[in-house]
Amino acid sequence: MYDVIIIGAGPAGSTLARLIGKRYRVLLVDKGMVLPKNGKAPAAKCCGGLLAPDAQRMLARMELGLPRDILSGPQLFAVRTIDLLNRIERYYQRSYLNIDRGKFDQWLASLLPPDVELRQTCFFRGFAEDEQGLRVHLSQDGSIHEEYTSLLIGADGAFSLVRKQAFPQMPAPRQYIAIQEWFKSERPLPYFTAIFDPEVTDFYSWLIPKDDKMIVGSALRTGETATANFELLKSKLREYGFDLTHSIEKSGAMLMRPVKMSQVLTGQGRVALIGEAGGWISPSSAEGISYGFRSALALADALMSGLEGFQKRYLRRTRRLRSNIRLKNLKAPFMYNRILRRIVMTSGIHSIDVSSP
């Protein structure tokens, strides 16, 4: 009998397990590998690998400092914003930590206390409730396992199976697919590039330097046109002057965008949600690491007083986080409405001038 079973060992799940692992008997489950196993290295999530200021602030709050080998180069202090349709370009000052996302997740998992049991390459298949608690069905190496727990936590990302089974009637955030392709880059760009073009997506696209490589990515509406729109993006970037000659690899992942507060869910009864599974992600930038940290910390604080009544405490502790998402949705039209974006970028407000030799 476990006190808590957490599905998903990303930043949200690993952080929650670390924070409550000495108080509760915790099982942390992930369908992939977050730590090396049988001589194999874990595969990195489809992610740009940038720690925004909000994520840096959360690391500071948790008294965590990044090991040097997690960092990638270059470190970035500006965003180059390109509106392809309006043919406007601006630079804005913003500091990011450029990291190797795979090593970052491994590092977070390495901080787990020895009391936490971690099962890798283990799949969540469903759960049922009875008088003793929740019977959680897991599969690993071709075998089905059943574990009992008092509390089930969904930290399994945008395509959360825990959320789908526990709350099938609740509205889910708008779905996107993030597609990324890595290219060889002889001269790393000294900035993060954000690209807006409604012919490609109603969200945004990006270019991120990563050592001697460059990531081209886009958050695309799901459907048959996603791949074609990604190819359209690359075609437009080549015309704009970017060298996308030597492709290395391509990956994809589901992405959520909560455009209504009814799509953000903390949980109910014996099931709670953290990270993107609960809709905790920025609807304007798709930044999710800081939201994963903040929701995990809120739930950990709620559980410090015990399991009884934790849902009300968790809901109360996420009040500011919900307000943050509301503000991001108010900000979104100035980024994604073509006319408003043109007005803001043409004005030059908050932009910086750059000098290149």
Image (spheres, rainbow, N blue to C red):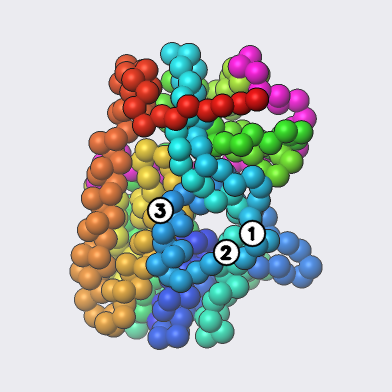
* Foreground residue among 343 and 115: 343
The residue that appears at 48% across and 75% down in the rendered structure is 18
The residue that appears at 79% across and 68% down in the rendered structure is 39
Q: Is residue 204 visible?
A: no
Q: Is residue 13 visible?
A: yes
Secondary structure, mark 3, is helix
Whether pointer 1 and pointer 2 mark residues with C-beta atoms closer than 8 Å, the reply is: yes
Tell me how far mark 2 sits from mark 3, CA to CA.
15 Å
Give the residue pinned by disc 1: 70
Give the residue pinned by disc 3: 54
Whether pointer 2 and pointer 3 mark residues with C-beta atoms closer than 8 Å, the reply is: no
Q: Please state the total of marks drawn on the protein image.
A: 3
Q: Position of residue 74 (x, y in %)?
A: 64, 45
Residue 245 in the magenta stretch? The answer is yes
103 relative to 286, above or below: below
The residue that appears at 77% across and 70% down in the rendered structure is 38
Give the residues in magenta.
239-261
Residue type beneath disc 1: Ile
Work out whether mark 2 precedes mark 3 in sequence or the reverse, and give the earlier one: 3
Secondary structure, mark 1, is helix
Give the residue pinned by disc 2: 66
Q: Few, some or many C-alpha atoms within 10 Å of disc 3 (few <14, some 14-19, many ≥20)?
A: some
Residue 255 in the magenta stretch? The answer is yes
Residue type beneath disc 2: Leu
Whether pointer 1 and pointer 3 mark residues with C-beta atoms closer than 8 Å, the reply is: no
Work out whether mark 1 precedes mark 3 in sequence or the reverse, and give the earlier one: 3
